[in-house]
């Protein structure tokens, strides 16, 4: 069966694309950048490499998997239901039951097992939206980069859902949204207007604060310091050039919307400014454009890395740029705290 009235919504980041499809089908049309911002999605996370010396750590510019969806749904007053089935058969039965009830089903998968995915690496924190199961086929929506609406063998989806390999696997996790609050469907703009500054405040508090060596700007500074030494620490890797370049590609293409999610957060601030005529956001939109450009420059250096061609100096340049980015983001979020505290307080 397939959801008869479903219309795929395209996006650049897997989880916000999935969330948008769930909420849009339930009755509210909210943009992907808006969901990312309301979900307090921006961050920096450092996860140790599974085999230090032979690979790079996982370095990502967003908060943890599923947390973004929880935050956004909480801000919007939407009930997000999550569950994990014990096995593949139970997971399939649960998904079919939700489809029969008219829900789009969000699920975490390992990209290695998706037939249409170009990557041959295991990454288990990817999200897709399921909207149909016909015979032996599954109908899903992935990011625009992966072709949007896709049809794949159900067996491929089963393996992708069951995988316990790759980064932060959650086998058989699925989620859906209950019926939306009436006001969200009838007066979407009013709800969004009320929730933008509180979400900005929570994000700015976290990003301007101290979150330890794995999260936030402290983690970014840690990564910057280590990147300067990668020409030595990755000497044991099979393909050190490829390992370094892979980080750059991940920050640009792997479901980030570009610039390691900074582009997506800038688009959130820009939409909030333009949609509601909020001039107080204008200078921060401009500052984020500069930060986005800085990320793009660092990414270009990583993607062009060649260890044999004075790679140490190139990595030192990347490290210097990332340290400067961390300082710029620290300053921006500290300044953003001032109007956010005032504006969010006015809406309590």
Image (tube, rainbow, N blue to C red):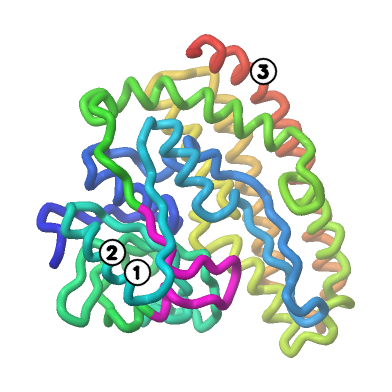
Crowding at dot 3, Cα within 10 Å, few <14 / some 14-19 / many 20+, comes out as few
Crowding at dot 1, Cα within 10 Å, few <14 / some 14-19 / many 20+, comes out as many
Nearer the viewer's eye, disc 2 or disc 3?
2
Q: Earlier in the sequence, mark 3 or mark 1?
A: 1
Q: Nearer the viewer, residue 264 or 59?
A: 59
Given contact means CB atoms under 8 Å apart, are the residues at marks 2 and 3 in contact? no
Reply above or below: 343 against 207.
Answer: above
- Give x and y (percent) for residue 317: 82, 60
Given contact means CB atoms under 8 Å apart, are the residues at marks 2 and 1 in contact? yes
In whole angstroms, how far apart are the C-alphas of marks 3 and 1? 46 Å
Q: Residue at x 66, y 68 (%)?
A: 247
Q: Nearer the viewer, residue 51 or 94?
A: 94
Numbered disc 1: secondary structure: helix
Label 1: which residue? 91
Q: Residue at x 64, y 41 (%)?
A: 290
Left or right? Give the position of 180 relative to 204. Answer: left
Q: What's drawn in magenta, residue-wise?
A: 159-175
Label 3: which residue? 338
- Give x and y (percent) for residue 219: 77, 51
Given contact means CB atoms under 8 Å apart, are the residues at marks 3 and 1 in contact? no
Q: Which mark is residue 95?
A: 2
The quadrant of the image that shows the N terminus is bottom left
Reply above or below: 342 against 289.
Answer: above
Magenta-span inclusion, residue 312: no
In whole angstroms, how far apart are the C-alphas of marks 2 and 1? 6 Å
């Amino acid at each position: 069966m397939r959801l008869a009235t479903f219309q795929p919504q395209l996006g650049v980041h897997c989880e916000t694309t999935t969330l948008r499809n769930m909420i849009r089908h339930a009755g509210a049309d909210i943009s992907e950048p808006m969901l990312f911002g309301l979900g307090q999605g921006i961050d920096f996370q450092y996860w140790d490499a599974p085999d230090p010396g032979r690979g790079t750590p996982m370095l990502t510019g967003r908060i943890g998997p599923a947390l973004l969806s929880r935050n956004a749904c909480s801000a919007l007053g939407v009930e997000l239901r999550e569950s994990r089935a014990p096995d593949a058969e139970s997971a399939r039965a649960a998904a079919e039951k939700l489809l029969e009830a008219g829900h789009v089903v969000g699920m975490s998968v390992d990209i290695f097992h998706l037939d249409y995915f170009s990557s041959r690496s295991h990454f288990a924190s990817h999200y897709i939206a399921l909207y149909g199961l016909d015979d032996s086929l599954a109908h899903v929506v992935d990011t625009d980069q992966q072709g949007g609406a896709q049809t794949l063998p159900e067996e491929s989806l089963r393996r992708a859902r069951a995988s316990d390999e790759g980064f932060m696997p959650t086998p058989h996790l699925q989620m859906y949204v209950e019926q939306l609050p009436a006001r969200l469907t009838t007066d979407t703009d009013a709800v969004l207007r009320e929730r933008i500054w509180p979400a900005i405040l929570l994000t700015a508090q976290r990003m301007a604060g101290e979150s330890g060596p794995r999260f936030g700007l402290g983690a970014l500074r840690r990564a910057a310091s280590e990147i300067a030494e990668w020409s030595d620490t990755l000497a044991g890797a099979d393909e050190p050039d490829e390992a370094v370049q892979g980080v750059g590609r991940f920050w640009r293409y792997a479901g980030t919307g570009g610039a390691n999610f900074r582009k997506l957060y800038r688009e959130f601030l820009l939409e909030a400014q333009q949609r509601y005529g909020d001039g107080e956001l204008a200078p921060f939109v401009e500052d984020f454009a500069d930060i986005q450009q800085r990320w793009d420059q660092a990414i270009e250096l990583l993607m062009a890395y060649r260890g044999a061609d004075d790679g140490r100096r190139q990595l030192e340049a990347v490290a210097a740029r990332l340290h400067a980015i961390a300082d710029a983001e620290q300053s921006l979020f500290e300044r953003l705290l001032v109007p956010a505290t005032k504006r969010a307080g006015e809406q309590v």
